[in-house]
Image (tube, rainbow, N blue to C red):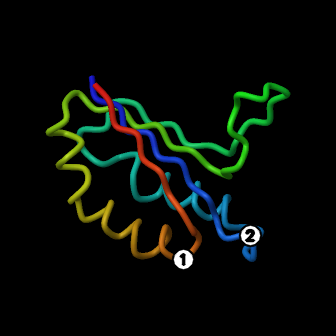
Amino acid sequence: MFSHVVIFWTNPEQPDAPDRLIEGAHRYLKDIPGVVNFHIGKMASSERDVVDQSYQVALNAQFESQQAQDDYQVHPEHLEFVEKVFKKVCQRVVIYDFE
């Protein structure tokens, strides 16, 4: 199993940016071949000091292998998502990949 976790900070000048990002991810990313599990959502608030609450949206995609994730990165739908959605609504991203 290979996990691809993406943390997004959206543009605060665009109040609908988190919703646009989530909708775009569902439209372009979730059905790309190789995706085993796909979950995207808004940050969950927490009273715990150790929980990062600085971001707006997170994505967790799981693949059978790193190669499947590598193929996902260059898939036309992923590239379209980056151009048509991500670049228009996000200011920052941090990615955590692990096996």
The residue lying at 40 percent from left, 75 percent from top is 83
Q: How many marks?
A: 2
* Residue 61 horizontal/vertical position (percent): 40, 37
* Residue 63 horizontal/vertical position (percent): 28, 32
Looking at the rendered image, the disc whose residue lies closer to the viewer, 1 or 2, is 2
Q: Which residue is mark 1?
A: 88
* Residue 23 horizontal/vertical position (percent): 58, 58
* Residue 55 horizontal/vertical position (percent): 66, 51
Height in image: 70 above or below 44? below
Q: Name the image quarter holding the C terminus.
A: top left
* Residue in the foreground of this view, choosing between 63 and 28: 63
The residue lying at 66 percent from left, 70 percent from top is 11
Q: Earlier in the sequence, mark 1 or mark 2?
A: 2
Classify 10 Å Cα crowding around label 1: few (below 14), some (14-19), many (20 and above).
Answer: some
Q: Which residue is mark 2?
A: 12
* Distance Cα–Cα, label 1 vs label 2: 12 Å
Q: Which of the numbered marks, if any, corresponds to residue 53?
A: none
* Residue in the foreground of this view, choosing between 95 and 78: 95
> Is the residue under label 2 in contact with that under label 1 (CB below 8 Å)?
no
Say what amino acid the circle numbered 1 marks: Lys
